[in-house]
Amino acid sequence: MKPAVYIETSVISYLTALPSRDLIVAAHQRLTNDWWQIKRKDFSLFASQLVTLEAGRGDAGAAARRLNALKDIELLETSSEAEKIAHELLSQKILPKKAADDALHIGIATVNGMNYILTWNFKHIAKAETREGVEEICRRNGYQPPIICTPEELLGE
């Protein structure tokens, strides 16, 4: 059985965006494309309605590219358990109130047994300072926390 990966919206955005002139963003785009081309076949990919909602926002052409990239990815359901974890992440101030969608991404991935959350969101999701709190809340609710990482970390050798 392949490890399960929850694809968060930032990954789809980097995958489908026009090449950036910003060196860091361009490197993230390249790493995302490398992972998508080389490694995604080694994993079972999942997203959620929240990802499709976020991907559909903004410029119509960019949104169409993002939604097209998601078309063959299985969507996970949002459940009351996922919402409970998200609520706890916010109420315990692990994530700020303005990061409600990011907390829900974590909740959805957790209750659906994802091995990984793949993200470039360093502001709220892939943040070393919050990792311990995220893991504690997942475990307190009876779930194994997913490993939160970037495509670069999941590229392997």
Image (spheres, grey):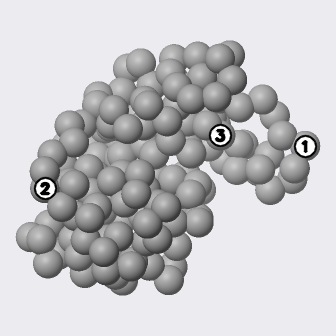
Q: Which quadrant holds the C terminus?
A: bottom right
Residue at the (43%, 66%) spot, across then down: 97
Q: Which quadrant holds the N terminus?
A: top left
Circle 2 SS class: helix
Q: Is residue 19 left or right of residue 129?
A: right
Name which of mark 1 and mark 2 comes first in the sequence: 1
Label 2 Cα neighbours within 10 Å, binned few <14 / some 14-19 / many ≥20: some
Looking at the rendered structure, the kind of residue marked 3 is Tyr
Pointer 2 residue: 81
Picture quadrant where residue 53 is located: top left
Label 1 Cα neighbours within 10 Å, binned few <14 / some 14-19 / many ≥20: few
Please say if 22 is above or below 145. Answer: above
Q: Is residue 117 visible?
A: no
Depth order, front residue of 74/4: 74
Residue at the (72%, 43%) spot, across then down: 30
Pointer 3 residue: 14
Picture quadrant where residue 153 is located: bottom right
Q: Is residue 37 left or right of residue 27?
A: left
Pointer 1 residue: 21
Label 3 Cα neighbours within 10 Å, binned few <14 / some 14-19 / many ≥20: many
The picture places residue 28, in percent across and down from the top left corner, at 70, 50
